[in-house]
Amino acid sequence: FSVRIGSEMKGRRDEIAALADDFDISAQRLDELRQAQQRLLHDVSHELRSPLSRIRAAIGVLEQNPAKSATMMERLVREIERIDDLVGEILTLARLTSRSDEAEIQAVDIIDLVNEILNDASFEGEARGITLTSSVAGTFVAEVNGELIYRALENVVRNAVKHTAENTHVSVGCRIEGEVLRVCVADEGPGVSEDELETIFEPFSRGSGPVATAGYGLGLAIARRAVERHGGSVRASRAPGGGLQINFVIPRSPLRRS
């Protein structure tokens, strides 16, 4: 995939030169996909190795000291659940990336989904003194796969609650603009640097901040791909208070416009 032939055209402007340009573009894209696949395989193996190592260690403790069976069984169950969660996220990401299957489309009020997510997130944030402020009202019925859109929005809101500082708040707003819904989620956490605003959407990317090691780094990747599959977009920016701001654009009926 490193071969490029456009430079060999020596200024030609005919169909052969155009074909050479197309070839170079295709080769570049294929090379990027190959590299992404290699990174994904490396990251998956790395993420699976850690819980498997802990399972192996727990089994070793059980063999040497059967009296600790209750404690070690709890550890084994936790590690198996982590592996199960990770495999589930990887499969979701793979389906969204390959587009190998057609997701079921329903008429869903996305603002209802947002309010449901906010109720759960508010409960989770109480323990750390985090409040959620919202400007979410009205209805926005869209033709989407409700499960995918719910997961995309939930991943971002829960990330915001997880990474914002204690005793601060997360703001969530929805604004209807014609045939699209704009959703903005902003936290008061450490945020990310300007050069990481795109890389955080890559699988297994955790950024370089002090809370970057939490989770698997798949939530934002799944969120972007799920929304893009519906013809929308997800972008990150730095929030006015220094945290992270995620902006969704979700069209009402992407299937009719395609």
Image (cartoon, rainbow, N blue to C red):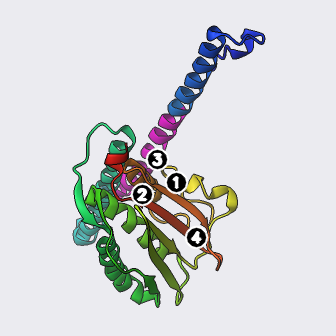
Mark 2 sits on what residue?
A: 223
Q: Position of residue 7 (x, y in %)?
A: 74, 15
Taking the view exactly as shown, the residue that stands out farthest to the front is 178
* Marking on residue 244: 4
Amino acid type shown at disc 4: Leu
Q: Is residue 226 at least partly visible in the picture?
A: yes
Q: Which residue is at 38% across, 53% downward?
A: 226
Q: Position of residue 2 (x, y in %)?
A: 63, 20
Of marks 1 and 3, the one in the foreground: 1
Q: Earlier in the sequence, mark 1 or mark 2?
A: 1
Q: Secondary structure at mark 4?
A: strand
Cα distance in 3D space between marks 1 and 2: 8 Å
Amino acid type shown at disc 2: Ala
Q: Earlier in the sequence, mark 2 or mark 4?
A: 2
Q: Quadrant of residue 250?
A: bottom left
Q: Earlier in the sequence, mark 1 or mark 3?
A: 3
Cα distance in 3D space between marks 2 and 3: 22 Å
Amino acid type shown at disc 3: His
Q: Position of residue 251 (x, y in %)?
A: 39, 57
Mark 1 sits on what residue?
A: 201
Q: Earlier in the sequence, mark 2 or mark 3?
A: 3
How crowded pointer 3 is (Cα within 10 Å; few <14, some 14-19, many 20+) is rated as few
Q: Secondary structure at mark 2?
A: helix
Residue 18 is left or right of residue 153, and the answer is: right
* Marking on residue 46: 3
Work out whether residue 170 or residue 46 is closer to the camera in this orientation and state it.
170
Tag 1 near tag 2, CB within 8 Å: yes
